[in-house]
Amino acid sequence: MDGRINRRLLMKSTVAAAIATPALTRTALAVAAPALPWPAAEAIVRNTRLPSFPDRNFAATAYGAKGDNKTDNTEAFRKAIAACAAAGGGHVIVPKGTYVTGAIHLRSNVDFHLEDGVLLKFSGDASKFPTVLTRYEGIECMNRSPMIYAHKQTNIALTGKGTLDAGATGGWNKGNDRAYLESLVAKGTPPEKRVVPGSGKNMRSTFIEPYDCDTVLIQGVTLKNPKFWQIHPTLCKNVTVDDVHTDPTTSANNTDACDPESCDHVVISNSDLGAHDDNVAIKSGRDEDGRRINVPCQNIVVVNCRMNGNWGAITCGSEQTGGIRNVYGYKLSCVNATKFALYVKSNTKRGGFSQNINLDSVSGTFARAFVYVTTTYNSQTGDQVPEFGPFSISNSSCTKASRVLDVSGLPQEHVKGLELRDSKFNGLDSTTNTVKNVDGLKFTNVTGNGKPMTK
């Protein structure tokens, strides 16, 4: 893709064509592009740490891995990762082949690297996915492991040009019994006792989920046949998702492409984000459990991505009880049936905040409004008033949308700041915006269907 991050060294991997223990060399490539239009976003990119690894390689095949499309490689991958971690870190190399496996758990200082031509086929055997701490739709619980998982690890990576396929997990990776978790929260049950497997209830597991980790890189891989959210860093710091390809197919619902939740310093770049739901959905916990943890998701940069999901390109919520702030989306191209460029959603049960959300150079065809902000999502009510704004849109465009703005604050808590500038919106069904309880609405050099837009 053209136009990559400026003033940033993104790790790229090349693997020499050796046979026994391939020599992996890493070079830091400066990728040229115009600077981000916000100094604050440049600072986020600059300060988001990337992992680094010793120049030490561990061939997964040396630990029994076989890419024959039938051998269970769960234990072989575990041994290779353990050996790499025990040696002080390095690169676990998976050579070309088709590997059947259960959950893969990353460990500190390990880069799990998939060569071009690798296919990981995750198993239909639920026993290969042990019970781990996770969040299901913003509520902590003990559920079956995501396909790729890490807990409290530092300096980890999943890299290479391999493909990960969760299609075979469909027999066990199903269900959406969130009401069961909500009943446990209401009883005061602690997360370690909110055990889903064996409860008679079913809740899906995400695809890739580092949980409470620091310094994470996910780069180059392709995801296929997800059953739930595809990339879900949770309670992490310093996360980089670069050059990934997620699945836009409609065979499963709620397959958001990338959902950072309660994270700090996240860069999502140069990626083709397909989803059957939101492209990037920023989250921070749900209702009482979200208030218990009370960690915001903040300092997020999404740059140079193709968005191929059917809901929001950048979505804040609805699980945003811990709050969201300092979000920057730049050079985002939305294709097919994307409903909203910016979708912000909460209610007085969820509460939270979405503040300082900024889009620049976003373009595409939108099935509904370019910006949709709702404080009454799903008509749920309580006494937790969400706080929204400021929001800014600049240098953006569309060739089709129902309208530009559908933005509603609450009578008791207005949206505080909404600015649009230097943008051209065409193909609008209506040039009249829906704006309620918004303070500081401002248009500068904005047209709708070729005419100046002032309200």
Image (cartoon, rainbow, N blue to C red):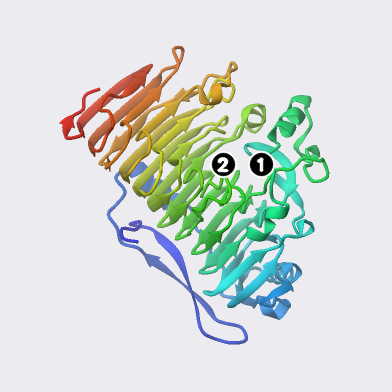
Which picture quadrant has residue 416?
A: top left
Q: Residues within 10 Å of mark 2 (few under 14, many from 20)?
A: many
Name the residue at 66% across, 71% down.
Answer: 99
Say above or below: 386 vs 427: above
Crowdedness near tag 1: few (<14), some (14–19) or many (≥20) residues, C-alpha within 10 Å = many
Callouts 2 and 1 close, C-beta under 8 Å: yes
**Residue 296 left/right relative to 140:** left
Looking at the image, which residue is at 41% across and 17% down?
414
The residue carrying mark 1 is: 135
Residue located at (38% from left, 44% from top): 329
Q: What percent of the width, then of the height, locates residue 58?
A: 64, 76
Identify the element where label 2 is drawn: loop
* Residue at the limit of the structure toward the top, as seen here: 412
Q: Residue furthest right?
A: 198
Q: Which amino acid does label 2 sit on?
A: Glu
Image quadrant for the C terminus? top left
Of label 2 and label 1, which has the lower sequence position? 1
Q: In which quarter of the image is residue 135?
A: top right
Q: What's the residue at 35%, 61% (across, down)?
A: 1
Nearest the eye: 104 or 378 = 378
Residue type pointed to by label 1: Arg
Give the labeled residue for mark 2: 261
* Helix, strand or loop status at disc 1: strand
Q: In this view, does 208 lie to the left or right of 368?
A: right
The location of residue 400, given as percent across then percent down, is 29, 40
Whether residue 106 is visible here, answered yes or no, is no
| Residue 352, position as x, y percentages in the image | 54, 27
